[in-house]
Amino acid sequence: RMPPEVSEPMAKPACPVASGGILDVISTDSIHIDNDKAVRIKTARGRGGLLRNLTYANLTGTVKAAISLTLEYSKGIPPTNDSATPELRDVFLRNITLTSRGDFDDEKEKVPLLALLRKQQQQRKVDSSAKWTYLECAGLDDSHIDAVHFRDVVVKPDPDYLRHLTASCSFCSGATDDISSPTPCFLDSPS
């Protein structure tokens, strides 16, 4: 359990190599202030290990992207065991309220909403196509992410930026309640 004043929970992993497995982890009562992600679980083939019964509860704040669960993360990390395939199951996300600001690739997207509205009024056009992925859930074709549970998870776009939230899911399954918003994409993901 992390104290509420910690703004970078789970920024340093408990174990940099999960090849032996990680079970029954709970992260609660975290306030995020302009963090990259509130929930981030990343591993890759060659790292192996079972990740199971991971609970994130009572998270609030502002982040670039809210949730990232991936079994395809391999940016410069050498494998510890070439044949090891990671498994991720039973991830519980509860009572989470986050604002997603997105990541800004160019100066145009950094313009605050009021300045953008003034500019659009002058040009008489509205560009509402700016989108940001708030949820990434990427399993492997032979190792799906199973049983991701959303309960009272609400992610909203930052009102100072004109953004729509999208989600990206592949080989991921789970369930959600009627309160969570937006509806996570894993409900439609191939299984």
Image (cartoon, rainbow, N blue to C red):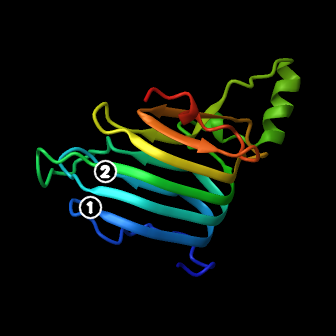
* Numbered circle sitting on residue 18: 1
Q: Nearer the viewer, residue 97 or 113?
A: 97
Residue 108 location in percent, x, y? 64, 33
Residue 52 location in percent, x, y? 39, 58
Residue 112 location in percent, x, y? 75, 43
Query: What residue is drawn where x is 49% and y is 38%?
Result: 173
Task: Judge left or right: residue 179 versus residue 67.
Answer: right
| Amino acid bearing label 1 | Ala
Q: Residues within 10 Å of mark 2 (few under 14, many from 20)?
A: many
Q: Nearer the viewer, residue 16 or 148?
A: 148
Query: What residue is drawn where x is 31% and y is 51%?
Result: 43
Residue 181 appearing in the image: yes
Query: What residue is drawn where x is 63% and y is 31%?
Result: 131
Which is nearer the N-term, disc 2 or disc 1?
A: 1
Specify the farthest residue to the top. Answer: 124
User: Dot 2 corresponds to which residue?
Assistant: 43
| Amino acid bearing label 2 | Thr
Q: Secondary structure at mark 1?
A: loop
Quarter of the rendering occupied by the C terminus: top left
Mark 2 and mark 1 in contact? Answer it, CB < 8 Å: yes
Q: Secondary structure at mark 2?
A: loop
Task: Judge left or right: residue 141 versus residue 155.
Answer: left
In the rendered image, the vertical position of residue 170 relative to residue 49, given as above or below: above
Residue 156 location in percent, x, y? 73, 46
Task: Judge left or right: residue 141 versus residue 162.
Answer: left
